């Protein structure tokens, strides 16, 4: 049953990522499951030690979470590659997606072997046009260039489409997408083939077992169970299932023996026999039917997520824009109102992650609100709104904007279960702080 649960968890991860087999026109590949996206990206960086060297360039977006910065900074130091910075702080703070791409275009060269990009700023909420960025890299960079995308801050809000985007690697965190605390790393078929001999798992592990080669110690059993639960939740969101339950719908343990006996004589290639590979029996079949979402389920679920986020996001953006226009805060990221939910695509301008800092007068006084005071006022007993402050590990972005990373910004984030009424509570708290 542990193996059955692990296989079902992998099926959930592949469906969420949007892995499409090469035979169906996709990029193929698989999804690695590990303790965190940070750890998986660190492992990936090590796998390139033998593949790059002096004369090569690694291009890293400074607006990124440090998880997709540090591995490449370290790789450059170990191998003698030149580290090139994709410096887009000013464009990111203004929400200028076109300028972000223009800066990328100028930074690329035929020496570029790796591009490490941030899908969504986990501070400012601006969304990178990934397809356009990948196209630039394929046109202007080395033929061997790989595109490593951090989609952790994007994945809770919109559907991942790794095959459509054409990325080589894409990290996301299920614990931010309604699942257990773990990380996932998609790699295309071609991307895995390039590094398959350098995965961190044991030397005797078959390099053709792409994902497993990057899963030393295997996937934790509780993580597998949590991912299956996440799959069930996405099915509920999509309308494919109408209830959350701790029971497997339609499964009876006594059916396992008779079900396996019934298919024993069938060819190993038959669809029925494939469901009991490894002796999983009715347990695995029920996991798949009850908890593993189809790709269509995932797409519909995130359409609903976008719809549920629409009004609270619009309200919060309006509140923060008003304070920005009054001159009491500096709001970062795209300020243009989002499009109607049905018209949204992966390249839209923002997700509901907002950041600001209190405006500072030339003669700042102790009575003026600081980042810490704003957060304390909102989180206190009077309002009980859980916002945060800090760099959120986007340390280099804060430095480029002249912000102290130890203080950082005030960040307000929404998910599909937040409401307009909750945003109104935050509005009231902010009005009291800045009155």
Image (spheres, rainbow, N blue to C red):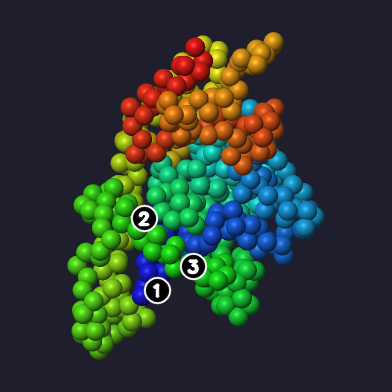
Q: Position of residue 157 (x, y in %)?
A: 41, 41
Q: Is residue 413 left or right of residue 369?
A: left
Frontmost residue, 409 versus 69: 409
Please tell me which of labels 3 and 2 falls first in the chain: 3
Instruction: Measure the C-alpha gap from mark 3 to mark 2.
Output: 16 Å
Question: Is the residue under label 1 in contact with that under label 2 (CB below 8 Å)?
Answer: no
Frontmost residue, 33 versus 406: 406
Pointer 3 local density, CA inside 10 Å: few below 14, some 14–19, many at least 20: some
Residue assigned mark 2: 230
Frontmost residue, 25 versus 84: 84
Instruction: Judge whether residue 190 can be spotted in this image.
Output: no
Question: Is the residue under label 3 in contact with that under label 1 (CB below 8 Å)?
Answer: no
Q: Quadrant of residue 7?
A: bottom left
Residue assigned mark 3: 219
Q: Residue at x 67, y 13 (%)?
A: 364
Q: Position of residue 234 (x, y in %)?
A: 32, 52
Instruction: Measure the C-alpha gap from mark 2 to mark 1.
Output: 17 Å
Pointer 2 local density, CA inside 10 Å: few below 14, some 14–19, many at least 20: many
- Give the vertical position of 131 relative to 193 (above or below): above
Instruction: Measure the C-alpha gap from mark 1 to mark 3.
Output: 10 Å
Q: Position of residue 313 (x, y in %)?
A: 39, 29
**What label sits on residue 2 in the rendered view?**
1
Q: Residue at x 28, y 61 (%)?
A: 246
Q: Position of residue 321 (x, y in %)?
A: 47, 19
């Amino acid at each position: 049953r542990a193996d059955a649960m692990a296989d079902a968890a992998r099926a959930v991860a592949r469906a969420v990522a949007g892995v499409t087999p090469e035979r169906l026109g996709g990029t193929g590949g698989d999804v690695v499951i590990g303790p965190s996206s940070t750890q998986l990206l660190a492992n990936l960086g090590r796998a390139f030690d033998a593949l790059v060297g002096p004369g090569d360039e690694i291009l890293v977006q400074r607006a990124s979470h440090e998880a997709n910065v540090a591995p490449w900074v370290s790789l450059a130091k170990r191998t003698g590659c030149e580290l090139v910075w994709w410096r887009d702080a000013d464009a990111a703070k203004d929400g200028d997606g076109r300028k972000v791409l223009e800066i990328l275009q100028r930074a690329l060269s035929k020496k570029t072997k790796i591009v490490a990009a941030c899908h969504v700023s986990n501070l400012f909420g601006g969304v990178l046009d990934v397809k356009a960025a990948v196209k630039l890299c394929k046109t202007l960079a080395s033929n061997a260039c790989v595109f490593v995308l951090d989609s952790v801050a994007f994945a809770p809000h919109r559907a991942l489409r790794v095959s459509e985007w054409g990325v080589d690697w894409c990290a996301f965190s299920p614990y931010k997408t309604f699942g257990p605390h773990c990380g996932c790393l998609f790699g295309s078929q071609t991307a895995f083939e390039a590094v398959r001999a350098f995965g961190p798992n044991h030397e005797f592990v078959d390099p053709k077992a792409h994902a497993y080669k990057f899963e030393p110690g295997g996937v934790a059993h509780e993580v597998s169970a949590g991912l299956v639960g996440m799959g069930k939740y996405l099915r509920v969101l999509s309308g494919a299932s109408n209830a959350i339950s701790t029971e497997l719908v339609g499964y009876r343990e006594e059916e396992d023996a008779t079900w396996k006996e019934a298919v024993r004589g069938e060819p190993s290639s038959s669809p029925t026999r494939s469901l009991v590979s490894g002796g999983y029996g009715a347990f695995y079949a029920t996991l798949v039917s009850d908890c593993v979402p189809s790709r269509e389920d995932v797409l519909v679920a995130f359409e609903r997520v976008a719809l549920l986020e629409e009004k609270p996001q619009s309200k919060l953006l309006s509140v923060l824009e008003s304070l920005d226009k009054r001159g009491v805060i500096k709001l970062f990221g795209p300020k243009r109102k989002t499009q109607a939910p049905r018209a949204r695509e992966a390249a839209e301008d923002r997700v509901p992650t907002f950041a600001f800092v209190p405006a500072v007068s030339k003669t700042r006084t102790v009575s003026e609100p600081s980042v810490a005071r704003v957060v304390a006022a909102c989180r206190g007993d009077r309002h009980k709104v859980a916002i945060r402050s800090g760099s959120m590990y986007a340390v280099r972005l804060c430095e480029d904007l002249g912000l102290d990373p130890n203080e950082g910004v005030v960040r307000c984030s929404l998910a599909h279960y937040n409401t307009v009424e909750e945003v109104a509570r935050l509005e009231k708290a902010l009005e009291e702080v800045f009155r």
